[in-house]
Amino acid sequence: MIRKLTKLSAFVLLLLLPTLLQAQQNPPDFRTFVIDTLYGGNFPDEESVVVTIMGDGFTASEQDRFMSVATAFKDTLLSTAPFNTMNDKINIYAIKVISPVSSNAPGYVFPNHATTQNAISNTYFGVTRNAQMFNIPNPGKDRMETLLLHFTPLVNMPVLFVHSTLYGGLANSIGSGLPNVGIATSHQTTANPHQLMLHEIGHSFGGLGDEYDRPGYGSESYFNMTQVNDVNTVKWRAFLGLNPDGRGDIRIVRHPQAPQNVPPGNTAPWFRPRTNVDCRMGNLMDPPFCIVCQAQLARVIASVTGKTFFGGSDKMTFANVPAGQDRIVNFAFFGMYALENVNIASSVDSIGDYAFLRCTSLTTITNFAEVPQNISGNNTIFHGVNRSKITLRVPSGTEAAYLAAGWTGFRSITTIPADVKEPVSEPIAINRARVNTWHTSGGDAYVRNALYDGDLNTFWHGNWGTGSGRRGGEGLADIDLGSVQMVSRIEIVARQGRNITALRMLRHGEIGDIFPNGQTMGGNPYPTTAANVSQSLIDADFATTGWSNVNAVIGGLNSRTATILLETPISARYIRLGITSGDHAQVAEIRVFGGESGGATSIVNVEKSNNRYGIRFAENPVSDKVEISVVLPNNERAASANVVIYDMVGNAVWATTASATGLSWDLRNSAGRIVANGTYLVVAEVKDRNGRVHTYSARLGVKR
């Protein structure tokens, strides 16, 4: 409840008025503020969750109080699951923000956000308060943006403690592509404020929804909220019945909603994983995050720190943990019911809780670690998985070591075949790119090769505003891979100090070159004079036909590196990305990967060839060369085809675009080396006379 203004407090306010007016006109110089490192993990900011703690309403003489609050929150965060499992990938900083006046002074009244959201007063950020919600006015957000970009441009989790005994909190947008900020009171008598801040970063960092009894508008974008009341399809079905913290089973619990909280025109009920008292997103002060919310937070942590995480992608049948990954994080593959084969690189030295939760179709795990990961005594890793149906393949001579490390109960433990290679994570080379918008003051220096030059200091800076044919601040980037490739994952790295806030992907169905003639590729996609052409003309010149949406899992939004994970990898040469970083696109690098999360058996929408239509081989198996053709339904012959050939680990070994009637493969990989004996999967994508795309697969044996 907001404190009433008494005669005494009004008198105090009048005495303070000259100071407050001066504070509005002459705020402290942010460059004089001091930043302290409260906790440093083992990795640089580029590879870590960067937490920046700030305060508002703390004067110069109250900075010790601020530091005690910041230190206490640091300890709370590092001991809270799932952050406690990734402490070495977390860096925590505190900026001593000095306010001209104390918002904890007797009689201090916070401005009302409804009437002062475009003005700043009193404290450095000018925090306002409505009901039990602290907020930041627009000028205060501008100050926060400047402060963060100056001190911690790679911040993932901004945190703001408001100096007050009043209860309140909020997760708020800063804008301009920066991550959302969690705001909470610094101290009060009714509860622990650091626990309240955990709730707020559940919103700001984890993208979780409220679970208490009077929720705001629901959204299916929240992993812990849904309108699906079906145990077979609810998004957290992999967790149903689990009760690791003893606070009750994960279920589908109806969300009590007051009439004023129901979105207009949407009266269908919302559901949550537990009652409100059993999760931090419902009970703001006491319980831990439930296991469903922990999984979502782990997903975001993995996205920020570059760890493999495919959990919830229930269509994928093949996945790799590539070389360079040092661990499999908690929940990494949860609920992947179709997952059959997993390759684990030798660099992986640990596996987290519930990593393979209810991966019920698992049949093969190929683990390249010479020193096996110790999973003894951890019954959660393969919870809900029948190990007796899984073949475990390990390096020669390590079978006994794996048994001693807890790798027991499997159908068999065998040696990895000599021709099976360790998974790697190397991006596909991008041939050229173009964009439909750029900030003219930067000229082509902002665009030339910046999207794929490997340099994070060069970047594409899109135009501000909506422009013609764009949504909000979205910019479009077309990527040409040079030839048809199987694409399974795309990483988009924002310009330093910015974040990817929205993302979508399209593909082009044409096999030929869709880039208009006369444009300069590999540099500025239009002549430099195009900077003076109206945006509508630029958009008109930008190819708009032949593109179709791609279904994908989008991860890492509101962080510097966002990921597009294709549950069903696609064969494509041309990819279009719609990218938003606040009010315009700001991208340092785009990386395209193939064959690491997908591979042969993960192409679930590919139709197997049969005796009526599909891929035809002149002979099978083959010893030196194979002739390939494609027959469509009704005995129609395809004119040309995109063809990709995979080994059984899922690596793309050869690809081409050629005639579908006279295509041949000389059994050499894309590097020109003869492939090993074994079974390969041939995938061909063709068009019929009506323009419909058909994709077929067939197995081919190589035997010399």
Image (spheres, rainbow, N blue to C red):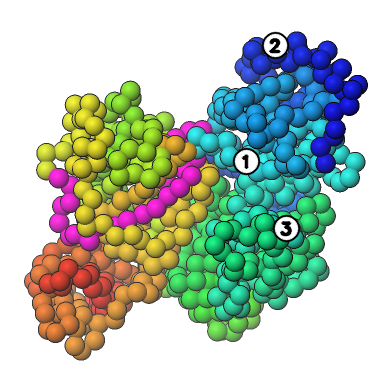
Q: Taking 448 as reference, is 408 above or below it?
A: below
Horizontal side of residue 263 vs 490, given as left or right:
right
Image quarter where the N terminus lies is: top right
Circle 1 residues within 10 Å: few <14, some 14–19, many ≥20: some
Type of amino acid at the residue the image marks with label 1? Asn
Circle 2 residues within 10 Å: few <14, some 14–19, many ≥20: few
Q: CA distance from mark 2 to mark 1?
A: 27 Å
The quarter of the displayed image where residue 486 is located? bottom left
Mark on residue 172? 1
Q: Taking 73 as reference, is 107 above or below it?
A: above
Residue that label 2 marks = 22
Residue drawn 50% across the image and 54% down it: 555
Q: Nearer the viewer, residue 183 or 112?
A: 112
Highlighted magenta segment, given as a residue range: 492-516
The quarter of the displayed image where residue 23 is located? top right
Q: Nearer the viewer, residue 172 or 616?
A: 172
Residue that label 3 marks = 214
Q: State the image coordinates of residue 25 (x, y, percent, origin top left).
A: 64, 12
Residue drawn 82% across the image and 18% down it: 13
Nearest to N terminus: mark 2 or mark 1: 2
Horizontal side of residue 428 vs 323, given as left or right:
left
Q: Nearer the viewer, residue 443 or 408?
A: 443
Type of amino acid at the residue the image marks with label 3? Arg
Residue drawn 84% across the image and 45% down it: 192
